[in-house]
Image: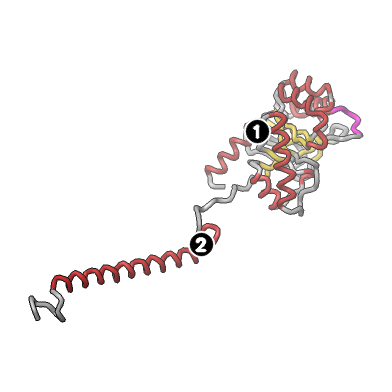
Amino acid sequence: MRGGAAGGLPVRRLLTAAALCAGVLLLAGCAGAAGERAGADARGQDPAHAAGPLVRPARLPPVVDRVRTRDPVVFLTYDDGAERDPGFAGLVSERRLPVTLFLTDRVAGPGYGHLARLRAVGASLQNHTLDHPALRGLPHAGQRAEICGQQHKLRSRFGIRPHLFRPPYGTYDRTTLRAAADCGITAVVLWRASLSADGELTYPHGEPRLRPGDIISVPSAETESLTPAERTVRLLGEIEGRGLRVGRLEDYLRHEITGRRAAGN
Protein backbone atom coordinates (compact mmCIF):
# COMPACT_ATOMS: atom_id res chain seq x y z
CA MET A 1 0.00 0.00 0.00
CA ARG A 2 1.26 3.45 -0.80
CA GLY A 3 1.47 6.23 1.79
CA GLY A 4 -0.24 4.06 4.45
CA ALA A 5 -3.29 3.78 2.20
CA ALA A 6 -5.75 0.90 2.56
CA GLY A 7 -7.16 -0.39 -0.68
CA GLY A 8 -5.37 2.39 -2.53
CA LEU A 9 -7.06 5.25 -0.57
CA PRO A 10 -5.02 7.73 1.53
CA VAL A 11 -5.39 7.44 5.30
CA ARG A 12 -6.56 11.09 5.56
CA ARG A 13 -9.46 10.44 3.19
CA LEU A 14 -10.46 7.32 5.14
CA LEU A 15 -10.47 9.23 8.42
CA THR A 16 -12.56 12.06 6.93
CA ALA A 17 -15.10 9.59 5.55
CA ALA A 18 -15.32 7.81 8.89
CA ALA A 19 -15.91 11.08 10.73
CA LEU A 20 -18.67 12.05 8.32
CA CYS A 21 -20.30 8.67 8.70
CA ALA A 22 -20.20 8.92 12.51
CA GLY A 23 -21.70 12.39 12.34
CA VAL A 24 -24.54 11.19 10.13
CA LEU A 25 -25.24 8.27 12.46
CA LEU A 26 -25.18 10.58 15.50
CA LEU A 27 -27.61 13.02 13.89
CA ALA A 28 -29.92 10.22 12.85
CA GLY A 29 -29.89 8.84 16.38
CA CYS A 30 -30.70 12.25 17.87
CA ALA A 31 -33.49 12.83 15.38
CA GLY A 32 -34.92 9.44 16.14
CA ALA A 33 -34.84 10.05 19.89
CA ALA A 34 -36.43 13.47 19.46
CA GLY A 35 -39.10 11.96 17.29
CA GLU A 36 -39.85 9.34 19.91
CA ARG A 37 -40.16 11.99 22.63
CA ALA A 38 -42.39 14.15 20.45
CA GLY A 39 -44.56 11.19 19.67
CA ALA A 40 -44.88 10.33 23.35
CA ASP A 41 -45.79 13.93 24.20
CA ALA A 42 -48.34 14.18 21.42
CA ARG A 43 -49.97 10.94 22.50
CA GLY A 44 -50.23 12.32 26.02
CA GLN A 45 -51.89 15.57 24.93
CA ASP A 46 -55.35 16.46 23.74
CA PRO A 47 -55.00 16.51 19.90
CA ALA A 48 -56.48 20.00 19.84
CA HIS A 49 -53.63 21.23 22.04
CA ALA A 50 -50.80 19.26 20.45
CA ALA A 51 -50.76 21.51 17.38
CA GLY A 52 -50.83 24.81 19.21
CA PRO A 53 -50.72 26.64 22.54
CA LEU A 54 -52.99 25.56 25.37
CA VAL A 55 -56.16 27.66 25.57
CA ARG A 56 -57.70 27.57 29.03
CA PRO A 57 -61.51 27.39 29.18
CA ALA A 58 -63.36 30.43 30.50
CA ARG A 59 -63.92 30.39 34.26
CA LEU A 60 -67.54 29.49 35.06
CA PRO A 61 -69.32 32.35 36.83
CA PRO A 62 -70.52 31.78 40.40
CA VAL A 63 -74.26 31.59 41.12
CA VAL A 64 -75.25 33.90 43.98
CA ASP A 65 -78.44 34.75 45.85
CA ARG A 66 -76.69 36.82 48.50
CA VAL A 67 -73.34 38.52 49.07
CA ARG A 68 -71.05 37.62 51.94
CA THR A 69 -70.70 40.89 53.82
CA ARG A 70 -70.94 42.25 57.35
CA ASP A 71 -72.16 45.62 56.11
CA PRO A 72 -75.84 46.30 56.91
CA VAL A 73 -76.85 46.30 53.24
CA VAL A 74 -79.29 44.48 50.95
CA PHE A 75 -79.59 44.76 47.17
CA LEU A 76 -82.58 45.75 45.04
CA THR A 77 -82.89 44.06 41.63
CA TYR A 78 -85.71 44.43 39.09
CA ASP A 79 -86.68 42.16 36.22
CA ASP A 80 -88.01 44.40 33.45
CA GLY A 81 -91.23 46.34 33.91
CA ALA A 82 -89.98 49.00 36.32
CA GLU A 83 -88.87 51.26 33.50
CA ARG A 84 -92.50 51.65 32.38
CA ASP A 85 -93.46 53.40 35.63
CA PRO A 86 -92.82 57.14 35.22
CA GLY A 87 -92.57 57.54 38.99
CA PHE A 88 -89.83 54.95 39.36
CA ALA A 89 -87.05 57.03 37.79
CA GLY A 90 -87.98 59.93 40.06
CA LEU A 91 -87.81 57.69 43.12
CA VAL A 92 -84.42 56.28 42.13
CA SER A 93 -83.10 59.78 41.56
CA GLU A 94 -84.60 61.29 44.72
CA ARG A 95 -83.45 58.47 47.03
CA ARG A 96 -80.23 57.85 45.09
CA LEU A 97 -81.05 54.17 44.99
CA PRO A 98 -78.35 51.94 43.48
CA VAL A 99 -80.84 49.57 41.82
CA THR A 100 -79.95 46.85 39.31
CA LEU A 101 -82.26 46.17 36.34
CA PHE A 102 -82.09 42.79 34.58
CA LEU A 103 -83.42 43.39 31.08
CA THR A 104 -85.03 41.19 28.44
CA ASP A 105 -85.02 42.79 25.01
CA ARG A 106 -88.48 41.49 24.08
CA VAL A 107 -89.98 43.13 27.19
CA ALA A 108 -87.78 46.18 27.72
CA GLY A 109 -87.09 47.03 24.08
CA PRO A 110 -90.02 49.45 23.71
CA GLY A 111 -88.91 51.19 26.92
CA TYR A 112 -85.24 51.71 26.14
CA GLY A 113 -85.76 55.47 26.19
CA HIS A 114 -86.94 55.30 29.82
CA LEU A 115 -84.03 52.99 30.60
CA ALA A 116 -81.59 55.61 29.38
CA ARG A 117 -83.09 58.04 31.90
CA LEU A 118 -82.88 55.45 34.67
CA ARG A 119 -79.25 54.78 33.82
CA ALA A 120 -78.59 58.52 33.95
CA VAL A 121 -79.80 58.63 37.56
CA GLY A 122 -77.67 55.67 38.65
CA ALA A 123 -79.50 52.45 37.74
CA SER A 124 -77.32 49.56 36.53
CA LEU A 125 -78.46 47.71 33.39
CA GLN A 126 -77.72 43.98 33.25
CA ASN A 127 -78.61 40.89 31.18
CA HIS A 128 -81.86 38.84 31.36
CA THR A 129 -81.75 37.27 27.81
CA LEU A 130 -83.29 38.37 24.54
CA ASP A 131 -86.64 36.56 24.68
CA HIS A 132 -87.03 35.29 28.27
CA PRO A 133 -87.05 31.52 27.67
CA ALA A 134 -86.49 28.93 30.40
CA LEU A 135 -82.86 28.09 29.63
CA ARG A 136 -82.36 24.83 31.52
CA GLY A 137 -82.15 21.89 29.11
CA LEU A 138 -81.64 24.01 25.98
CA PRO A 139 -78.55 23.32 23.82
CA HIS A 140 -75.44 25.40 24.32
CA ALA A 141 -75.86 27.27 21.02
CA GLY A 142 -79.39 28.34 21.92
CA GLN A 143 -78.47 29.51 25.41
CA ARG A 144 -75.43 31.32 24.10
CA ALA A 145 -77.53 33.11 21.46
CA GLU A 146 -79.97 34.33 24.13
CA ILE A 147 -77.28 35.63 26.48
CA CYS A 148 -74.74 36.96 23.98
CA GLY A 149 -77.56 38.42 21.87
CA GLN A 150 -78.70 40.58 24.77
CA GLN A 151 -75.10 41.55 25.49
CA HIS A 152 -74.92 42.85 21.92
CA LYS A 153 -78.26 44.69 22.22
CA LEU A 154 -77.26 46.51 25.39
CA ARG A 155 -73.82 47.31 24.03
CA SER A 156 -75.23 48.74 20.81
CA ARG A 157 -77.91 50.82 22.60
CA PHE A 158 -76.00 52.01 25.67
CA GLY A 159 -72.32 51.31 24.98
CA ILE A 160 -72.13 48.99 28.00
CA ARG A 161 -71.03 45.39 28.44
CA PRO A 162 -73.08 43.80 31.25
CA HIS A 163 -71.21 41.40 33.50
CA LEU A 164 -74.17 40.15 35.59
CA PHE A 165 -76.85 37.77 34.32
CA ARG A 166 -80.17 36.57 35.72
CA PRO A 167 -81.65 33.47 34.05
CA PRO A 168 -85.40 33.73 33.40
CA TYR A 169 -87.48 32.07 36.14
CA GLY A 170 -84.24 31.45 38.04
CA THR A 171 -83.68 28.15 36.20
CA TYR A 172 -80.30 27.18 34.77
CA ASP A 173 -77.89 24.28 34.25
CA ARG A 174 -74.17 23.86 33.70
CA THR A 175 -74.68 24.67 30.02
CA THR A 176 -76.11 28.04 31.10
CA LEU A 177 -72.96 28.77 33.09
CA ARG A 178 -70.74 27.82 30.14
CA ALA A 179 -72.76 30.01 27.77
CA ALA A 180 -72.71 32.91 30.25
CA ALA A 181 -68.93 32.60 30.57
CA ASP A 182 -68.63 32.65 26.76
CA CYS A 183 -70.55 35.93 26.74
CA GLY A 184 -68.37 37.66 29.34
CA ILE A 185 -70.66 37.20 32.36
CA THR A 186 -68.85 37.15 35.73
CA ALA A 187 -71.78 36.21 38.01
CA VAL A 188 -75.22 34.61 37.69
CA VAL A 189 -77.55 36.43 40.06
CA LEU A 190 -80.58 34.80 41.70
CA TRP A 191 -82.33 36.09 44.85
CA ARG A 192 -82.99 35.17 48.46
CA ALA A 193 -86.15 37.26 48.81
CA SER A 194 -88.79 38.27 46.28
CA LEU A 195 -91.35 41.08 46.45
CA SER A 196 -94.90 40.01 45.61
CA ALA A 197 -97.39 42.11 43.66
CA ASP A 198 -99.01 43.32 46.90
CA GLY A 199 -95.67 44.44 48.35
CA GLU A 200 -94.95 41.51 50.67
CA LEU A 201 -91.57 39.78 50.84
CA THR A 202 -91.44 36.01 50.27
CA TYR A 203 -88.46 33.72 50.85
CA PRO A 204 -87.93 30.65 48.61
CA HIS A 205 -85.63 29.08 51.20
CA GLY A 206 -83.83 29.82 54.42
CA GLU A 207 -84.81 32.06 57.30
CA PRO A 208 -87.87 34.19 56.43
CA ARG A 209 -86.36 37.57 57.27
CA LEU A 210 -83.97 40.00 55.66
CA ARG A 211 -80.30 39.58 56.49
CA PRO A 212 -77.25 41.63 55.46
CA GLY A 213 -76.12 40.68 51.96
CA ASP A 214 -79.52 39.45 50.74
CA ILE A 215 -80.42 40.02 47.10
CA ILE A 216 -84.07 41.02 46.65
CA SER A 217 -85.92 40.42 43.39
CA VAL A 218 -88.73 42.76 42.35
CA PRO A 219 -90.30 40.95 39.37
CA SER A 220 -92.61 42.71 36.93
CA ALA A 221 -96.30 41.86 37.34
CA GLU A 222 -98.85 42.78 34.69
CA THR A 223 -101.76 42.64 37.18
CA GLU A 224 -100.01 44.30 40.11
CA SER A 225 -102.12 46.46 42.40
CA LEU A 226 -99.16 48.69 43.22
CA THR A 227 -96.80 50.46 40.84
CA PRO A 228 -93.08 49.59 40.98
CA ALA A 229 -92.46 52.93 42.72
CA GLU A 230 -95.14 52.24 45.36
CA ARG A 231 -93.90 48.69 45.95
CA THR A 232 -90.35 50.01 46.31
CA VAL A 233 -91.38 52.67 48.84
CA ARG A 234 -93.10 50.00 50.93
CA LEU A 235 -90.06 47.76 50.66
CA LEU A 236 -87.70 50.57 51.67
CA GLY A 237 -89.73 51.05 54.84
CA GLU A 238 -89.18 47.40 55.78
CA ILE A 239 -85.47 47.55 54.90
CA GLU A 240 -84.88 50.67 56.97
CA GLY A 241 -87.00 49.28 59.82
CA ARG A 242 -84.52 46.41 60.10
CA GLY A 243 -81.57 48.79 60.30
CA LEU A 244 -80.46 48.03 56.74
CA ARG A 245 -79.82 50.15 53.67
CA VAL A 246 -79.56 49.52 49.92
CA GLY A 247 -76.06 48.81 48.56
CA ARG A 248 -74.75 48.73 45.01
CA LEU A 249 -74.75 45.07 44.00
CA GLU A 250 -72.06 45.42 41.32
CA ASP A 251 -69.53 46.87 43.75
CA TYR A 252 -70.06 44.23 46.41
CA LEU A 253 -70.08 41.35 43.92
CA ARG A 254 -66.90 42.60 42.28
CA HIS A 255 -65.16 42.57 45.64
CA GLU A 256 -66.49 39.10 46.51
CA ILE A 257 -65.54 37.55 43.15
CA THR A 258 -62.05 39.03 43.39
CA GLY A 259 -61.71 37.51 46.86
CA ARG A 260 -62.91 34.10 45.65
CA ARG A 261 -60.42 34.06 42.83
CA ALA A 262 -57.59 35.10 45.11
CA ALA A 263 -58.53 32.18 47.39
CA GLY A 264 -58.64 29.81 44.41
CA ASN A 265 -62.41 29.24 44.60
**Residue visible at 82% across and 25% down?**
229
Image: 160 above or below 259: above
**Residue visible at 14% across and 70% down?**
12
Q: Which mark is residue 51?
A: none
- Front in this rendered view, residue 191 or 20: 20
Per the image, label 2 sits on a secondary structure element best described as loop
- Is 225 included in the stretch rendered in magenta? yes
User: Mark 1 belongs to which amino acid?
Assistant: Glu
2 or 1: mark nearer the eye: 2
**Residue visible at 77% across and 38% down?**
193
- The residue pinned by badge 2 equals 45
User: Residue 137: in sight, yes or no?
Assistant: yes
Q: CA distance from mark 2 to mark 1?
A: 40 Å
Q: Position of residue 133 (x, y in %)?
A: 80, 46
Image: 255 above or below 11: above
With 208 as the anchor, is 212 left or right in this view? left
User: Mark 2 belongs to which amino acid?
Assistant: Gln
Magenta-colored span: 223-227
- Is 20 included in the stretch rendered in magenta? no
Q: Tell me the quarter of the picture where residue 16 sits.
A: bottom left
Residue closest to the far left: 3
- Front in this rendered view, residue 37 or 212: 37
